[in-house]
Amino acid sequence: MIRVLVADDHHLVRTSIAHLLNDEPDISVIGEAADGEQAISQARQLKPDIILMDIRMPGIGGLEATRKITRLTSDVRVLVLTAFIEEAFAQRLLEAGAHGFISKGSQHDEMVQAIHSVFAGKRYISPDIAQRLVLFRIDSTDNPFDQLSQRELQVAMMIVNCQKVADIADRMFLSPKTVNTYRYRIFEKLDVHSDVELTHLGLRHGLVDGFSEAE
C-alpha cells in the first residue's frame, strides 16, 4: 500500500484528489495539509511514502516545505503539483529534493501513474510540463529570480502572494525589521520599487499562478 499525503491550500482540490486516490486498491491517502507548515508536521507524524505538494501555498510554501521534509527523511518522495512552472524554479525544487512534477490539469490515470513511478524510485514529469520546460530553455531570457538567495526567494514568494511583513516574520521566525531588510535587498537585485512591481515580475516568471507571457 502506497501511503500518500496531499498538501494543497484549496480544500476542494485536496478532498477531490483524496477521494479519487482512495479508490485505488494500492493507494491510501493518510492525511491532508493546507500549507507548508502543516505538510512538514504531517510528514513527521504520519511518515507517508509520497507527498503531493502544491508549490504555492500560504506560509513557507511548497519549495521550502520540500527542502525541510527531505532533510528530515530520505524515505518520503515529493511529487510537485503545479499549474505552471518555469525551468529555474523547477531546478530549485529538484535541488530541494522533489522527485517529479505533475500538472493540476492531469487526468486521474496519469496522477496514479506518476505516484507509482515516484514510489518505485523514478522521476516523473507530466508531458505538458516537460514541454514547457524545454520551450523555456530554448526561448526564454534569464530568470531574474535566479540571482536571489534561497531565503530571499522564499520572502519574495510570500510577498507576491500578498502576505504582509508581519505575517512573513511570524511564519519565518524573523523580526519584521529583518524581513524588510530582505525585502529591500530583493527590490535592489530585481530593480523593482514596490510590492506591486515585484508581483508583476513574479507573474511574468511563474512565481504566481496567473498568466505567462506565452499565453
Image: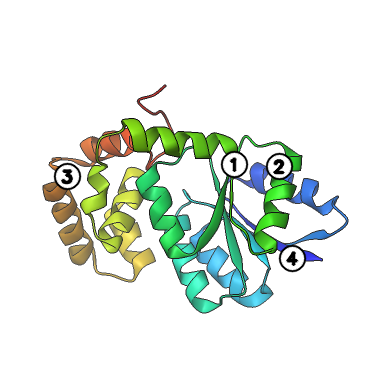
- Looking at the image, residue 84 sits to the left or right of residue 89; the answer is right
> Marks 4 and 3: CB-CB under 8 Å?
no
- Tag of residue 110: 2
Mark 4 packing: few (<14 Cα in 10 Å), some, or many (20+)? some
Q: Residue pushed farthest right?
A: 25
Label 4, on which residue? 3
Q: Nearer the viewer, residue 108 or 199?
A: 108
Label 3, on which residue? 190
Q: What color scheme is it?
A: rainbow
Amino acid residing under circle 1: Ser
Q: Nearer the viewer, residue 126 or 61?
A: 126
Residue 12, x across and y down, in percent: 67, 42
Residue 138, x across and y down, in percent: 35, 33
Mark 1 packing: few (<14 Cα in 10 Å), some, or many (20+)? some
Residue drawn at x 73%, y 48% is: 113
> Marks 1 and 3: CB-CB under 8 Å?
no
Comes first in the chain, label 1 or label 2: 2
Rounded to the nearest whole Å, what is the CA distance between mark 4 and mark 2? 17 Å
Rounded to the nearest whole Å, what is the CA distance between mark 4 and mark 1? 21 Å
- Tag of residue 126: 1
Rounded to the nearest whole Å, what is the CA distance between mark 1 and mark 3? 31 Å
Rounded to the nearest whole Å, what is the CA distance between mark 1 and mark 2? 8 Å
130 versus 148 height, above or below? above
- Looking at the image, residue 51 sits to the left or right of residue 136; the answer is right
Snapshot quadrant of residue 29 = bottom right
Rounded to the nearest whole Å, what is the CA distance between mark 3 and mark 2? 37 Å
Amino acid residing under circle 4: Arg
Rounded to the nearest whole Å, what is the CA distance between mark 4 and mark 3? 41 Å
Amino acid residing under circle 3: Leu
Comes first in the chain, label 1 or label 3: 1
Residue drawn at x 14%, y 49% is: 189
Amino acid residing under circle 2: Glu
